[in-house]
Image (cartoon, rainbow, N blue to C red):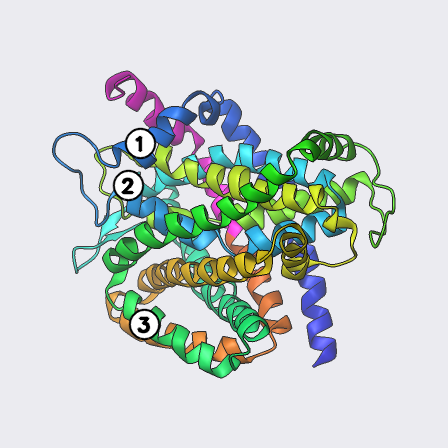
Amino acid sequence: MESFIQLLDKIDGIIWGAPLLVLLVGTGLWLTLSLKGLQFTTLFHSLYLALVKRKEEGEEGDGDITHFQALMTALSATVGTGNIAGVATAIAIGGPGAMFWMWVTGLVGMATKYAEAVLAVKYREKDKNGDMCGGPMYYITNGLGWKWMGTMFAFFAAIAAFGIGNMVQSNSVADAVHATFNIPVGVTGLILMFFVGLVIVGGIKSIGKVTSVLVPIMIVFYVLGALIILIMHAGAIPAALKLIFTQAFNPTAATGGFAGAGIMLAVRMGVARGVFSNESGLGSAPIAAAAAQTKHSVTQALVSMTQTFIDTIIVCSMTGLVLIITGAWSSGKNGAELTTFAFQSAIPGGALIVTVGLILFAYSTILGWCYYGEKSIEYLLGEKAIMPYRVLFVVFVGVGATLKLNLVWTLADIFNGLMAFPNLVALLALTPVIVSETKDYFENHYKK
């Protein structure tokens, strides 16, 4: 078994090696140039559409849920353990400079997320139940005519959902609850199964309603906790920012429990953890975007790209700055333990903020990824496969809470990487369609 795990680790390292990371960032840069920096020039308009306007004027377009609910469903799946443990891992291994490369990944990733949503809405279909179906498997098949590659993506996504979107999350919650409240992991697993099943049985409309309430509350709760720490240490913020920008381009010297890191390690950790956190390029979020009620693909795409901004530029930045200004980043700790240590050292009850945040983040991720998985299995096997998939998904929530998940984590990482390749190829091949849809919107539909 040990040799099998080592083999999987090697495969994981190959898949998530330089070629994929370069392809992920390179695709984001290519789309940024092709769209003339749209994520920067339309950011405030996009945030207005997402958080203030909430729906289009006049008659609503086709779709199952509102713009806001689609955004919150996508955010529910991405704002998760990556924002707490992922950021900590990046900085603990790559140094403060990794934070800069997370920002770069997030900023170009906004263009990727925008492009994914444009294609998801343009090429979506209605199933026999009248529900919307969309995502990479549909725009690969309908846009490029490559059904074999669309099938590959759907297969990888349906399996990955059980790992990174299910068992890894329930295990994180069970461990955190046991450490903080001494509740047995089996009990936590059963409670999670109940609350997950309660929501997902109603499909995307039920998930959208729950996440539209839960996600804003959990993000505000965590960000406010981090903000209090930053305000208390406001004088240290300029030095922290200087450290981030300086060490993004210079080797990070060993200090405290930190072993030191070269520039390439900072880049690799920042890019890898940034992608892990915001999922731009993996092809998961456009599955939720396809369900939105919209009359034009670009309207939802503008809303969708704010997901990466909120996830990486806001939430991840809060975690990273707390780690750096408290000095916890060089303590030798890693992952969620490092973030908990940083919060607890800064304010009384800081550990509770991280624990509650982790519980809410992980639970919402399970809801979002269940939808991604069921739409993937529907593409492969039809509508009749949805309910059995949901039942199996709930069962594995309980299983994941009680397991040691090194093997599951590695397998999930591998399948996440395999999802990215067909999706990125499709984005590059369909760039002319993305540009054409964008031009049509801003020339004929956009109201300033």
The residue at 66%/38% (across/down) is 233
Left or right of 77 on screen, residue 441: left
Q: Distance between the residues labelled 3 and 2?
A: 24 Å
Nearer-the-camera pick, 382 or 178: 178
Residue 327 screen position, x and y as percent? 75, 46
Q: Is residue 136 visible?
A: no
Above or below, comparing residue 2 to residue 359 in the picture: below
> Dot 1: within a 10 Å radius of its alpha carbon, few (fewer than 14), some, or many (20 or more) residues?
many
- Residue found at x 42% / y 36%: 306
* Residue range corresponding to the magenta coloring: 420-448
Judging from the image, what secondary structure is the residue with disc 2 in? helix
Q: Is residue 22 visible?
A: yes
Identify the mark nearer the N-term, 3 or 1: 1
Asked whether 15 or 59 is in front, the reply is 59
Distance between the alpha carbons at the discs numbered 3 and 1: 31 Å
Amino acid type assigned to the residue bearing label 1 in the image: Leu
Identify the image quadrant of the C terminus.
top left
Q: Name the residue under label 2.
A: 67
Please tell me the numbered disc located at residue 197: 3
Residue picked out by circle 1: 49
**Kind of residue at disc 2:** His
Q: Which residue is depicted at the point 64% across and 48% down?
A: 272
